[in-house]
Image: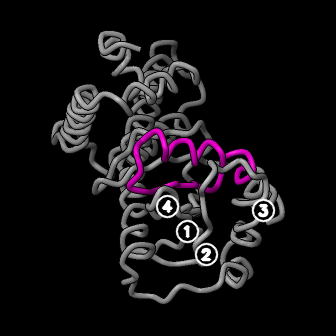
Amino acid sequence: MQCRDFLKLADSYLGNELLVETNHDVIKHLESCPDCRKELAARRELRARLRRGFESASELQMKEEFPARLTAELREAALRRRGLSSVQVIGIAASVLIVVSLGLIVSQRWRSRSDVALNESAAGDHRDCALNHRLDEAPIDLEEAGRKYDRAYINLVNAVTSEGRLPSGVELVGAHSCVFKGRRFGHVILKYRGQLVSVLVTDIEGQNGAGEITADAEVENFRLARFETSRHAVYVVSGLSEGENLSIAQALEPSLSRHIRDAERAT
């Protein structure tokens, strides 16, 4: 891949819109081209600023009481009169459509903020737990955490290491369950090319997860790759290159997703 090819695909790469094969070609090019890495970082920052600007725009804020008040008024109108004219029916339908549309916008904005917060928690746990060992709450054994808090933590180490799909040279350093700013993680620590790598599993109950691996997040100079099941998010966090970090996530996804889904079905 040449730089001109990358520039055509950069925005699609950031939006996770590329085919798997093309995505790999982009990552391979980025590993050998500092100019394109700078361009990608600039575009990523621009997208982040636009997203933050949209989320904080005062004119897009909806008063919390508006949906409940409008819903109550529509319900009262419907109960008051059994027979409604076509104009009234259209008016009520339009109002309901507005409420639903606004609800979707709010939901999307909430999910975006939630994702940012979750990314920051994963990076913070990697920094404070794996690298600096300065958590406020002492970690506990994974099996104990599995019995007390989340069955996905039981046999988590085996799910990470059992299938032999990790890149050659990856070593297991340790495993436990830890808490960062109120969020509990199952934490498996690996080492690859001199860098510590955190594999983090956390509950995202109610956030409607599940999706392909994403690797477009960078927090505090750490690379984050993420994939989800319906009720859990899995992070791979490290100071490796984007391609190296992503390759570990891709190697882990089949066995970890299967392990976590089995645990979800058992609860």
Work out whether mark 3 precedes mark 4 in sequence or the reverse, and give the earlier one: 4
- Hey, what amino acid is under mark 1? Ile
Considering only vertical position in the picture, is 37 above or below 190?
A: above
Horizontal relation, residue 108 to residue 233: left or right: left
Residue on which the image places disc 4? 197
- Hey, what amino acid is under mark 2? Ala
Q: Quadrant of residue 8?
A: top left
Would you say residue 257 is visible in this rendering?
Answer: yes
Work out whether mark 1 precedes mark 2 in sequence or the reverse, and give the earlier one: 2
| Mark 1 residue element | strand
Residue on which the image places disc 3? 263
Work out whether mark 1 precedes mark 4 in sequence or the reverse, and give the earlier one: 1
> Separation of disc 1 and disc 4 at Cα?
6 Å
Considering only vertical position in the picture, is 136 above or below 75?
A: below
The reply to whether dot 3 and dot 1 touch (C-beta < 8 Å) is no
Residue on which the image places disc 2? 175
Q: Nearer the viewer, mark 2 or mark 3?
A: 2
> Separation of disc 3 and disc 1 at Cα?
21 Å
Check residue 189 in the rendering and tell me which mark sits there, or answer none: 1
Report if residue 239 lies within the magenta region: yes
Residue range highlighted in magenta: 230-257
